[in-house]
Image: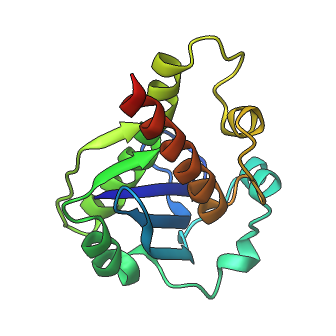
Amino acid sequence: MFAIIDTETSGGKYNEEKIIEIGILIFDGNHITKTFQSLINPQKKVDFFVQKLTGIKDKDLKNCKIFKDYAGVIKKLLNNKVIVGHNVSYDYRVLKNEFNEIGLKFEAKTLCTIELSKKLFPDLKSYKLKQICDYFNIQLCNHHRAFDDAKATTELFKIIRRVEKTN
């Protein structure tokens, strides 16, 4: 079982970023069996660059729950799953930091669709999510929004798995 994830974060100093939005799709290898998405109040100001990139403003997060309020649901969804993401090391690091901050240990295996794409499709000009989605005709609406990016990453992951099976 896989948990395809994407996070949008507040920006800021390394290891001080906070999740402002998370999208999770649980994928059994054939079908999406569950989804989760939410805005999250980071309890800090979101960098202007991030607000411009994502369209998520401080005012949009003011009345949202904080990460701790979602931690149980998120941890249960991710439990015993391989976490898949486009540049998964970033999402995984930020997620681990959020769990650590509230005193919960979190460990998981990860797969990165950038790394897998570089191995399987070495001739691509770019491995950015938008460019790779364009190349494979994967629909990517609302780029830089967590759930939509996770959805597109799921479609990319399906292509990667098909190619891996034929090689």
| Most distant residue in the top direction | 123
Residue drawn at point x = 52 percent, y = 55 percent: 6
Q: Which quadrant: the C terminus? A: top left
66 w.r.t. 89: above or below: below
| Most distant residue in the front direction | 166
Q: Tell me, yes or no, if residue 15 can be seen here.
A: yes
Q: Relative to the observer, which residue lies in front, 53 or 163?
A: 163
Where residue 94 appears, as percent x and y from the top left, is 41, 50
Q: Which quadrant: the N terminus? A: bottom left
Q: Tell me, yes or no, if residue 45 can be seen here.
A: no
Where residue 110 appears, as percent x and y from the top left, is 31, 42
- Image coloring type: rainbow
Q: Quadrant of residue 131?
A: top right
Where residue 151 appears, as percent x and y from the top left, is 59, 59
131 w.r.t. 17: above or below: above
Where residue 85 appears, as percent x and y from the top left, is 47, 45
Q: Quadrant of residue 149?
A: bottom right
73 w.r.t. 141: above or below: below
Q: So how many labels did they put on this image?
A: 0
43 w.r.t. 45: above or below: below
Q: Relative to the observer, which residue lies in front, 54 or 137?
A: 137
With 100 as the anchor, is 17 left or right in this view?
right
Q: Relative to the observer, which residue lies in front, 51 or 3?
A: 3
